[in-house]
Amino acid sequence: MDLMEAIKGRRSIRKYKPDPVPEEVLGTLMEAVKWSPSWANTQCWEVIVVRDPKMKSELVTALSKGNPALSSITEAPLVIVLCGKKGVSGFKKGEATTAKGDWLMFDTGLAMQTLCLTAHTLGLGTVIVGNFDHHRVAEILGVPQNIEVVAITPLGYPAAEGIAPKRKEISEFVFNEKYPVRE
Ligand SMILES: Cc1cc2nc3c(=O)[nH]c(=O)nc-3n(C[C@H](O)[C@H](O)[C@H](O)COP(=O)(O)O)c2cc1C
């Protein structure tokens, strides 16, 4: 699969088969995360792999009932919880380098996209889940204060295809030379 095919073909998957994900496949995905770019190569990401069904049931309690990814957390054989170490990305000698402060959301976002694209090329499904009670998940998983829980994805073999939501036209988000003046 070429890169553009992977980028355009990856979908959020919310229905999973119970089939296990082989450990070597999981290893390939972690290798993909390892080679993601990051601020000054700070690699602030940390990954928690949840396999225990009881743990997955607990994680579900951190999602609202209306979250479309709710059932996929218990359905998928694995759940990946992506975290970031605070005060590393975008920092030099303990000081934030830019007005944006911590770049951990950016770097973990890159890592998540790398993971999701790689998973797709291996026939696996993912759905990035960001809308949940992050404090609750940190509590359930024993994540310390200096580490931020960022996003979750179930991981497994898709039981149903995802439908591609419509995208904006390129002309709606690409501007030439300057930001357009809008009335
Ligand atoms: C940061 C982020 C948070 C998201 N949170 C959720 C979520 O809580 N629940 C969910 O079902 N989908 C979630 N999604 C998935 C998006 O809804 C999905 O990526 C978008 O609709 C485009 O569909 P596609 O991934 O199939 O291209 C999230 C995606 C991103 C990037």
Image (tube, rainbow, N blue to C red):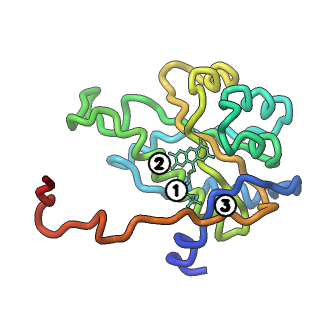
Circles 2 and 3: CB distance less than 8 Å?
A: no
The response on whether ligand 1 sits within 8 Å of label 2 is yes
Secondary-structure class at tag 1: helix
Disc 2 and disc 1: Cα gap in Å?
A: 6 Å
Task: Give the crowd class for mark 3: few <14, some 14-19, many >=20 residues within 10 Å.
Answer: some
Name the foreground residue: 10 vs 140: 10
**Residue behind mark 3:** 28
Name the residue furthest bottom: 2
Circles 2 and 1: CB distance less than 8 Å?
A: yes
Q: Please, what is the three-letter code of the amino acid marked with disc 3? A: Thr
Which marked residue is nearer to the observer: mark 1 or mark 3? 1
**Residue behind mark 2:** 109
Disc 1 and disc 3: Cα gap in Å?
A: 14 Å
| Left or right: where 172 falls relative to 19 | left
Residue 31 spot, x, y in % from top left? 60, 57
Q: Earlier in the sequence, mark 1 or mark 3?
A: 3
Instruction: Determine whether 153 is above or below 50 in the image.
Output: below
Identify the disc placed on residue 104.
none
Name the foreground residue: 181 vs 128: 181
Q: Residue at x 40, y 45 (%)?
A: 106
Q: Please, what is the three-letter code of the amino acid marked with disc 2? A: Gly
Instruction: Determine whether 46 is above or below 37 in the image.
Output: above
- What is the quadrant of residue 96 in the picture? top left
Which marked residue is nearer to the observer: mark 2 or mark 3? 2
Q: Earlier in the sequence, mark 2 or mark 3?
A: 3
